[in-house]
Image (spheres, rainbow, N blue to C red):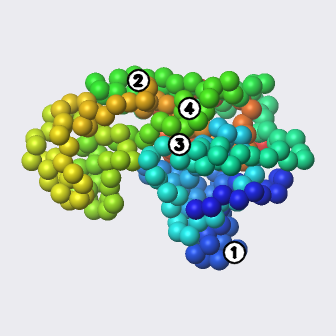
Amino acid sequence: MTLSPAPVGSGIRFVRTDIGPDAVVEALATHVSNTARSTTLTQNGINVITVEHLLSALTGLGVDNVLVSLDNEEIPILDGSAKPYCDAILADGTLPQDCERRYITLDREIVYEDAVKGIKVTVTPADTPSYDISVDFNSKVVGVQQAHWDPSVDYAGEIGCCRTFVFFHEIEYLYNNNLIKGGDVDNAIVIIEHPVPRERVEALCAGLSIPVPADTSVGYLDGLRLYYDNECARHKMLDLMGDLRLCGGFLKARVVAVKTGHCVNAKVARMIIESK
């Protein structure tokens, strides 16, 4: 994957170089085709998978226009956060362009709510963008967590570095249903919610060709050290910022999200587009 400067007004575009120079996918919610565990864009039959972490980094670091060249369909997951993208962008820096930033503004509040699942996302017009998120997985390990971001918060150091997470029983389900082929505990925080027999852990690790962890007690696999006590909420914030960039630009609004995920985020981004 290569990030290249792009002209004013071009926004974020992906080009699949393995297909050809015209295999372009625009970063818009109208192109979202799948939100199962990540966000996939499809335009003219061309897929780009797992776009949310890169889009989040570009948003948090203030990048307006960029061409993302890929020689395959999936954005590299790397360590499961946006840190590698932030590090690369910050190392090279960005340049101002001769144009004012195009903000996405609203003339009314937008609300998405699923009362049964306890999900709610409210997007309110505001002079300064801000995001607040609350997560609750009914987990004794994770608990209820909150996170906040606005332009005064160091995105790279406080949001972008926070890793994705998965529950051990979810990994078992995915593996047993042949839905993961290259699993690696180095790109996700693994949460053990309930005691797991050692033989189940050993069987899963053998199947994924990864070392058996020394510590499999309830908590974080192998006694993983979190960057922040609320790292899970911060990662969900990372996802939210990336998915909402699919509204077509920098959103100038106050976003308050409760128990949201990729599917709902994409729906809200589309609602914003359709409100214009």
* Label 1 vs 3, first from the N-terminus: 1
Which residue occupies 44% across, 39% down?
163
User: Badge 4: few (under 14), some or many (20 or more) residues near its Cα, within 10 Å?
Assistant: few
Q: Is residue 270 visible?
A: no
Left/right of residue 57 with respect to residue 109 in the rendered view: left
Residue that badge 2 annotates: 229
Q: Secondary structure at mark 3?
A: helix
Left/right of residue 202 with respect to residue 248 in the rendered view: left
* Label 3 vs 2, first from the N-terminus: 3
Q: Secondary structure at mark 2?
A: loop
* Label 4 vs 3, first from the N-terminus: 3
**Three-letter amino acid code at disc 2?**
Asp
Front-most of 91 and 210? 91
Residue that badge 4 annotates: 157
Q: From the viewer's perspective, is the residue at label 1 or at label 3 nearer?
A: 3
Q: Secondary structure at mark 4?
A: helix
- Quarter holding the C terminus? top right
Above/below status of 111 relative to 47: above
* Label 1 vs 2, first from the N-terminus: 1
Residue 200 image position (x, y, % from top left): 13, 48
Distance from the alpha carbon under mark 1 to that under mark 4: 35 Å
Distance from the alpha carbon under mark 1 to that under mark 2: 44 Å
Q: Is residue 76 visible?
A: yes
Q: Secondary structure at mark 1?
A: loop
The disc at residue 91 is: none
Residue that badge 3 annotates: 83
Q: From the viewer's perspective, is the residue at label 1 or at label 4 nearer?
A: 4
Residue that badge 1 annotates: 21
Above/below status of 131 relative to 161: above
* Label 1 vs 4, first from the N-terminus: 1
- Quarter holding the N terminus? bottom right
Front-most of 171 and 274? 171
